[in-house]
Amino acid sequence: MEDVLAVYARPFAERLPVVCMDETNKQLIQEVREKLPVEPGQPERWEHEYVRCGVAQVFLEVEPLTGRRHVEVRERRTRRDWALWIQGMLRTRYPQAERVVLILDNLNTHGIESLYETFAPQEARSLAERLEIHYTPKHGSWLNMAEIELSALCGQCLNRRIGDLNTMRREIAAWEQERNNRQAKIDWHFTTHDARTKLKRLYPNL
């Protein structure tokens, strides 16, 4: 826990951006009938019956100090999907960074071994050398600021029925652009001092 909080306390460094990454999923739900629009004296109405169309995987990264984020919708959440995400982060979105300081949970796909399973050793090593990974502790994923951004995404964009991947991708792309244009940042206040005071019960008794 203190390791992650120490990273959040670092001053901004363009060559060493701090990026938080997380994933979630969203059930794709198709309407069986058209919604009835709003009318005088009547709210919007829709059929309770629906059709399940699978599950979409949502990958999100956010740089809290700059208000920059990127979101993608994928069909799966495998080691290969995570490795391709990391390659896109380092080669396309942060090509000038010396290293990306990455905060994420310790899901079994979130490891350097995923890079080696996906790419040739030379490429895997090149990517790994540009990552400084800090894992949130077990049961401590709330320390990942990407969860705050995912909550905003779910509440502002994904809080309704969406029936297919293409529609979801368009909606998320519009949400991402609007948030990035506003440079919506995350104002984090929880510090190491707070942890030692408020979460004292989690520390070992010596």
Image (cartoon, grey):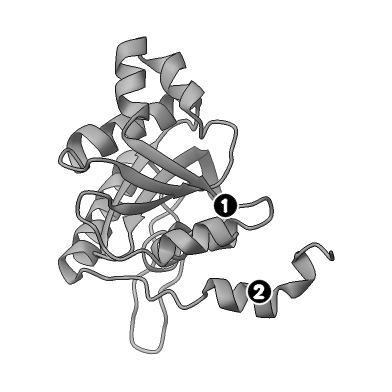
- Name the residue that disc number 2 marks: 196
Q: Amino acid at mark 1?
A: Thr
Near mark 1 (Cα within 10 A), the count class, few <14, some 14-19 or many ≥20, is: many
Q: Secondary structure at mark 1?
A: loop
Q: Secondary structure at mark 2?
A: helix
Rounded to the nearest whole Å, what is the CA distance between mark 2 and mark 1?
16 Å
* Numbered tag placed on residue 99 in the rendering: none
Task: Tell me if residue 53 comes above or below residue 186 in the rendering.
Answer: above
Q: Residue furthest top?
A: 120
Give the image location of residue 121, x and y in percent: 36, 11
Q: Residue furthest bottom?
A: 41
Which residue is at a point 54% across and 56% down the rendered structure image? 3
Q: Residue furthest front?
A: 206
Task: Tell me if residue 73 comes above or below residue 35 in the rendering.
Answer: above
Task: Tell me if residue 152 comes above or below residue 61 in the rendering.
Answer: below
Nearest the eye: 55 or 150 = 150
Residue 192 appears in view: yes
User: In the image, which is nearer the foreground, mark 2 or mark 1?
Assistant: 2
Give the image location of residue 79, x and y in percent: 49, 25
* Numbered tag placed on residue 136 in the rendering: 1
Nearest the eye: 169 or 149 = 149
Which residue is at a point 46% across and 40% down the rendered structure image? 57
Give the image location of residue 44, x and y in percent: 40, 74
Task: Tell me if residue 190 comes above or below residue 178 in the rendering.
Answer: below
